Amino acid sequence: MGKDKRHMKKSAGNIMIQILLVILAALFLFPFVWMLCTSLKTEAGIADYKQFFPWPVSFRAFEKGWKGGKFLIYIWNTVKIAGLCVIGTVCSCSLVGFGFAKFQSKAKNILFLVLLATMMVPQTVTLIPMYIMYSKFHWLNTIYPLVLPAFFGTSTFNIFLLRQFFAGLPNDLAEAAKIDGCSWFGIFSRIYLPNCKPALLVVVINQLVFCWNDYMAPLIYLGRPAKFTIALGLNAFKGEAGSTMDIGPIMAMAVVTILPLLILYLCFQKYFVEGVAASGIKG
Amino acid sequence: MVKQNGKKKKKLNDTSKLFWIFISPWLAGFCAFTCFPMLYSFAMSFTNWNGLTNRDFVGISNFIQILTKDKTFGLSLRNTFFYIGVSVPLNTAVSVFLATLLNKRLPGTNVFRGIFYLPTICTGVATYIAWTYLFNGTNGFINVMLNALGMESINFLGNRNTAMLSIIFMDMFCIGTAMTIVLAGLQDVPRDYYEAADLDGANGIQRFWHITFPLISPVVFFNVLMAIIKGLQIFTQPYVMTGGGPAQSTYVYGLYLYNTAFSYGKFGYASALAWVLFIIMILLTLVILGTSKFWVFYREDVN
């Protein structure tokens, strides 16, 4: 009987938690729902700011926003940068991660510590000299400053993540291939790399989201509107149109900015969450 | 791990050349994009370089200026510390709270986890602009809701007392990464610990403080450290939402540094500011590491 009572108390508690979770979820979704609703309003709907839901629904804000800015160019610029960064990061970080996971050297431990320590160096310390260097190379307003570092393993967190994954794969895989006369690069690219697809996908997603949302580096390196990424473009668009009362077009373009991330997230939700857990930080 | 198979260790020892080949991209990148700029910036911090003409060695006068006379330095550092001081404990509490709720594994947990993680992915200009409108003092929707509840409107971003707190409130929703790490930690807590506590008649709060928290303290510690490092570099939120105002109440260190370098072109002085930030970051990390022995427990300690 005592057990029964406890059981009831527990299930009552669970219902409370369930209700709490629903309320919290609504709170977390609220800004995004509001954004979408605002973007679907007519101009009169925007003026009636106390109304939450768009009625009548209209796509005029998307039309006006799309025509008002150069969003096609911004999106293309961002896709270009993000795509190249992803290729660079996957190539360089997997090589380096494999090196740290599977080979021995006297300097290995100290170098790995150095690698982890670079995660702590504030971006601003290196930003100013890099800006000066790039301006000397006449690389400002090009994609080089944003893309080139990715090819040289600068995203240390991704190296760390891949190293953890490679270290978890057995050495025996290499032994067998070595007997068959496979080179180390072949062993890496044909045996280990295909075996760590989930981790690579996590790296791809990490890098895509980072490039899509990055603001400070593009702000410094890209001054010309024709070169803007979507984040810069959206803020510039807000600056131009911000004084009007009609925030519909700005919110419509904000929705356009977020939409690719949202689709990516819905398709690969598992990998977003695994990326954190797989790094072995826990415990 | 290496120790476990000594035989293999020996075998892989011959591969030290391969080690260097495989890590060479990072090594080159480390020299070019981290080491060299750091040295460059360090050297630059002792000059009065303004990007154009002056490039004289001025000794440590930049640092003396920063630490003794520069009022904006003090102001922006205070604002940044205020941001960290409120936001780090708040975000830590929220992430642990959400992870604890999710760890009950009730129906729909995966959906809730997905929703709680969503703002973390969409952290960017788009959401900052949306929040700017939501916070609007006259027709922002948050004020519409407050009015509906019979409360006065608040000029969230337009008032020096509430502007930073509003940014902190917004950032409270971006705890997805921390939450996921805590959740992973929670799932490692052995169930029988709780059963033992149940037998002893411990209530929920006691269970949390005496069992759960000590066991997840290492991951919480990691989250706190990461949040501090990130918080010290906060830039985009105030840049997009307030521009540092009103009355410089959201003028954080990152903004000051950015303006010094890229608006006024004082590269030498800005480099000195960047190094001061770096040193503050290292000191703060050491302090947190020092406190860790009072509240972070590793399972080996118990055994």
Image (tube, rainbow, N blue to C red):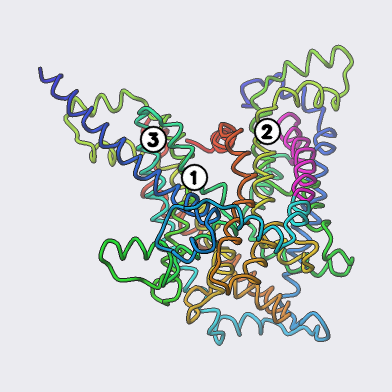
In the image, B263: left or right of A80? left
Amino acid carrying mark 2 in the image:
Leu
The answer for which chain carries disc 3 is B
Q: CA distance from mark 2 to mark 1?
A: 19 Å
Q: Which mark is residue B231?
A: none
Residue picked out by circle 1 = B176
Amino acid carrying mark 1 in the image:
Gly
Residue picked out by circle 2 = A201
Q: Residue at x 61, y 65 (%)?
A: B278
Tell me residue B121's x, y (percent): 57, 47
Q: Residue at x 49, y 45 (%)?
A: B176
Given residues A145 and B33, the one toward you in this image is A145
Q: Mark 3 or mark 1: which comes first in sequence?
A: 3
Q: Residue at x 37, y 26 (%)?
A: B190
Residue A99 included in the magenta stretch of the image: yes
Count residues near mark 3 (Cα–Cα under 10 Å), then give few for <14, some for 14-19, many for 20+.
Answer: many
Amino acid carrying mark 3 in the image:
Leu
Which quarter of the picture shows residue A179? top right
Above or below A259: residue B257: below
Residue B246 included in the magenta stretch of the image: no
Q: CA distance from mark 2 to mark 3?
A: 25 Å
- First to last magenta residue range: A79-107
Tell me residue B97's x, y (percent): 35, 44
Tell me residue A72's x, y (percent): 75, 54
In the image, B258: left or right of A9? right
Residue picked out by circle 3 = B102
Q: Give the structural element (helix, strand or loop) at label 2.
A: helix
Q: Residue at x 48, y 45 (%)?
A: B178
Given residues B76 and B141, the one toward you in this image is B141
Q: CA distance from mark 3 to mark 1?
A: 12 Å
Q: Give the structural element (helix, strand or loop) at label 1.
A: helix
